[in-house]
Image (cartoon, rainbow, N blue to C red):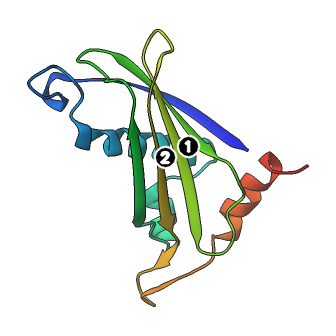
Amino acid sequence: MFTSTTQIRVRYGETDQMGYLYYGNYALFYEVGRAEAIRELGFTYRELEEMGIMMPVVDLHVQYYRPALYDNLITVKTILKELPEASKIQFHSELYNEEGVFLNKGVTTLVFYDPKEKKKVDMPEELRSRLAPFFDK
């Protein structure tokens, strides 16, 4: 299992009238977590794109338990529970407030996609080799 954590402070413009993080913005927090997780593996989305790989989101599931509030420092925990096979990858996200209280979880599924060929492709071997040690039994 691969786990990465990053922190994001809830900004005023991301909240609704009640001071809660607007429900649609949770997906943006997940995206920050994914980008930082990939960075920890030694890649950026830009580098993957330069390799001819795009990673569009094809599915998103979100569950809300407690609100994130304006000015909270949120910990985004991003987890890969299994080594991706073939063309899809699932990122599990968990959000916690400063007190460590669990707020929200989501699962985002992306595919590896070759925009020139306009088709799904397998995970790049360079990325697989960086992830594999986290899944050795």
Say above or below: 81 vs 72: below
Q: Quadrant of the N terminus?
A: top right
Q: Position of residue 69 (x, y in %)?
A: 27, 18
Say above or below: 14 vs 85: above
Q: Please name the amino acid that badge 1 sits on.
A: Ala
User: Residue at coordinates 37% horizontally, 17% vertically from top-left?
Assistant: 73
User: Residue at coordinates 79% horizontally, 55% vertically from top-left?
Assistant: 132
Q: Is label 2 in contact with label 1 (beta carbons under 8 Å)?
A: yes
Residue situated furthest bottom in the rendering = 117
Element under disc 1: helix
Q: Position of residue 135 (x, y in %)?
A: 80, 50
User: Residue at coordinates 17% horizontally, 27% vertically from top-left?
Assistant: 15
Residue situated furthest right in the rendering = 137
Q: Position of residue 112 (x, y in %)?
A: 52, 72
User: Residue at coordinates 40% horizontally, 22% vertically from top-left?
Assistant: 74
Give the residue at mark 2: 34
Q: Position of residue 90 (x, y in %)?
A: 56, 57
Residue situated furthest top in the rendering = 99
Q: Residues within 10 Å of mark 1 (few under 14, many from 20)?
A: many
Say above or below: 118 vs 30: below
Give the residue at mark 1: 37
Quarter of image, res 127: bottom right
